[in-house]
């Protein structure tokens, strides 16, 4: 019988709606376990109550449970799952992913974590599984953190994975009908120096790509296996190399796939590559591009080393309007040194972009979050009295819509939270309705969009009683969803018990 590895994708602290991205990071590393002869079981806690599933899949044949997590609210779920595993089994708990790679020393100190695999899992997940299977210490495997006689021990850091050795993700492990996007990753990393981004440390400000033949093979596999009408490219920076993108676009056109595809993009590529390039992009099936514009203040853009001009944003809106691509634009507030005038310039730019391209979306106005691995965190430690969290659980609230900016008072923090919510009900209200709003929520949704419109028009973000109610409602809804899942799990368990009794009687 094959030895088993259980991989767990934690949910978010508050999640709702019908839009669910695939657990792509786990699907990506699973083939390297399967290739080595191990059985892999994937548990997505967003779809199933993890206690019921883990009790079923963890047995004497399980080598370890691997848990991934990004910085922020996903850590809440990851901690809960890890602690629960310790109550039902002695199987090792192994953490990996972005947060664990950036702060392995913090993560491994937790009593519910036995090992941390830092770096890209394709390299060390297979050798690590063999070491556990053979009851050998992992000291010859790079990027492993563990405990030795109560002290933290670590092996040397590993290098980057050679993307020319990439395997197709293990799509067999999930039911793709339960997710809203299926896709592939054609490259990793980003060459730009944005000071708020984890990529500076995580990918060493490097960009790497798979060979075109592997990209084409994977697109062909996905299109033929799933008969997709939409395709997602999970790249940090898909458009880094113009010629490479042109080749991918022509491959899609030549094979008559007629698939709608989606990815991220920088606005300055519209200035540098020009309209004809994006005509080809649109012709190949690209309907939507997500762009992180961050600010409408050139001073702030220069400060965070965005390497873009406001003119690039205007060009982007104009060209996307002319070629028929829908831009989904994200912005950021709360950047150190930002003034009310800088924010006003950001808000005015949002309005201006929508006038140029009425089909554009403003998808978010995120609050600057001090992420590990980003150079800006050192600046705010030095200049703004920010204290780096020293424990894993302290990172749970570090997300785009929580305010962890120590240099602001309570009133100003609340204003930023309100600012972050308002654009979603102004610019993104139709998508918001499609993804998250069901019948009983419609009256509340219409009230929120009406009040958001008034706030936006008057640039008034104080006395935000409705957003306090919204946050309470989301927490309540999450608790109700959890209770519903637990009732379902108990009912399912009772049905299985009855079925077992009937089989024994027969």
Image (cartoon, rainbow, N blue to C red):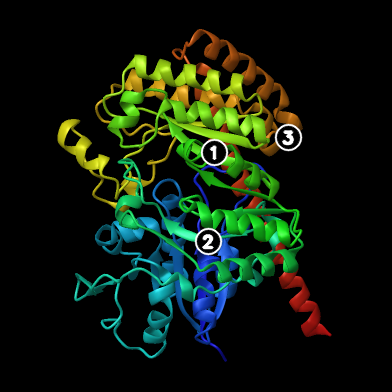
* Residue placed under numbered mark 1 in the picture: 274
Label 2 to label 3, Cα distance in Å? 36 Å
Label 1 to label 2, Cα distance in Å? 22 Å
Mark closest to the chain's N terminus, 2 or 3: 2
- Kindly report which numbered mark, 1 or 2, lies closer to the viewer in this rendering: 1
Q: Position of residue 72 (x, y in %)?
A: 41, 46
**In what quadrant of the picture does the N terminus appear?**
bottom right
Q: Is residue 21 visible?
A: yes
Mark closest to the chain's N terminus, 3 or 1: 1
The answer to whether residue 381 is left or right of residue 102 is left
456 or 309, nearer to the observer: 309
120 or 282, nearer to the observer: 282
Secondary structure at numbered mark 1: loop
**Mark 2–mark 3 CB contact (< 8 Å):** no
Residue 438: numbered disc: 3
360 or 209, nearer to the observer: 209
- Kindly report which numbered mark, 2 or 3, lies closer to the viewer in this rendering: 2
312 or 73, nearer to the observer: 312
Q: Position of residue 306 (x, y in %)?
A: 36, 37
Q: Position of residue 146 (x, y in %)?
A: 27, 72
* Quarter of the view holding residue 113: bottom left
| Residue occupying the far left of the picture | 382
């Amino acid at each position: 019988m094959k030895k088993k590895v259980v991989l767990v994708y934690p949910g978010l602290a508050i999640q709702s709606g019908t839009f669910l991205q695939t657990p792509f990071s786990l699907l990506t590393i699973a083939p390297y376990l399967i290739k080595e002869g191990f059985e892999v079981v994937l548990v997505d806690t967003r779809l199933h109550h993890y206690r019921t599933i883990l009790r079923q899949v963890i047995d004497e044949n399980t080598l370890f449970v691997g848990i991934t997590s990004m910085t922020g609210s996903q850590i809440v779920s990851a901690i809960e799952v890890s602690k629960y595993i310790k109550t039902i089994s002695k199987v090792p708990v192994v953490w990996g992913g972005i947060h664990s790679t950036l702060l392995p020393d913090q993560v491994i100190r937790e009593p519910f974590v036995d090992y941390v695999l830092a770096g890209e899992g394709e390299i060390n997940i297979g050798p690590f599984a063999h070491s556990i299977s053979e009851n050998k210490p992992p000291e010859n495997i790079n990027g492993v953190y563990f405990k030795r006689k109560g002290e933290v021990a670590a092996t040397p850091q590993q290098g980057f994975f050679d993307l020319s050795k990439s395997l197709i993700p293990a799509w067999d492990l999930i039911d793709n009908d339960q997710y809203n996007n299926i896709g592939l990753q054609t490259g990793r990393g980003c060459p730009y120096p944005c000071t708020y981004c984890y990529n500076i440390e995580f990918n060493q400000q490097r960009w790497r790509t798979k060979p075109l033949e592997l990209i084409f093979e994977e697109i062909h596999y996905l299109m033929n296996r799933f008969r997709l009408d939409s395709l997602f490219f999970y790249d940090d920076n898909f458009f880094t190399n113009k010629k490479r993108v042109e080749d991918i676009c022509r491959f899609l056109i030549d094979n008559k796939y007629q698939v709608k595809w989606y990815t991220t993009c920088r606005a300055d590529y519209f200035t540098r590559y020009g309209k004809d390039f994006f005509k080809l992009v649109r012709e190949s099936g690209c309907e939507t591009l997500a762009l992180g514009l961050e600010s409408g203040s050139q001073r702030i853009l220069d400060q965070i080393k965005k390497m873009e001009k406001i003119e690039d944003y205007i060009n982007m809106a104009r060209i996307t309007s002319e070629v028929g691509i829908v831009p989904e634009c994200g912005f950021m507030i709360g950047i150190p040194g930002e003034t009310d005038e800088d924010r006003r310039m950001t808000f005015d730019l949002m309005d201006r972009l929508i006038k140029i391209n009425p089909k554009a979306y403003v998808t978010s106005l995120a609050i600057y979050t001090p992420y590990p691995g980003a150079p800006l965190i050192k600046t705010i430690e030095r200049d703004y009295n920010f204290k780096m969290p020293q424990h894993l659980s302290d990172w749970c609230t570090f997300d785009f819509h929580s305010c962890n900016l120590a240099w602001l008072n309570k009133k100003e923090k609340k204003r930023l939270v309100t600012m972050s919510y308002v654009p979603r009900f102004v610019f993104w209200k139709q998508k918001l309705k499609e993804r998250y709003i069901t019948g009983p929520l419609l009256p509340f949704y219409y009230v929120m969009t009406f009040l958001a419109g008034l706030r936006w028009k008057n640039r008034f973000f104080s006395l935000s009683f409705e957003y306090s109610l919204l946050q309470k409602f989301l927490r309540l809804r999450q608790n109700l969803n959890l209770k519903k899942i637990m009732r379902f799990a108990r009912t399912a368990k009772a049905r299985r018990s009855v079925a077992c009794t009937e089989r024994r009687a027969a």
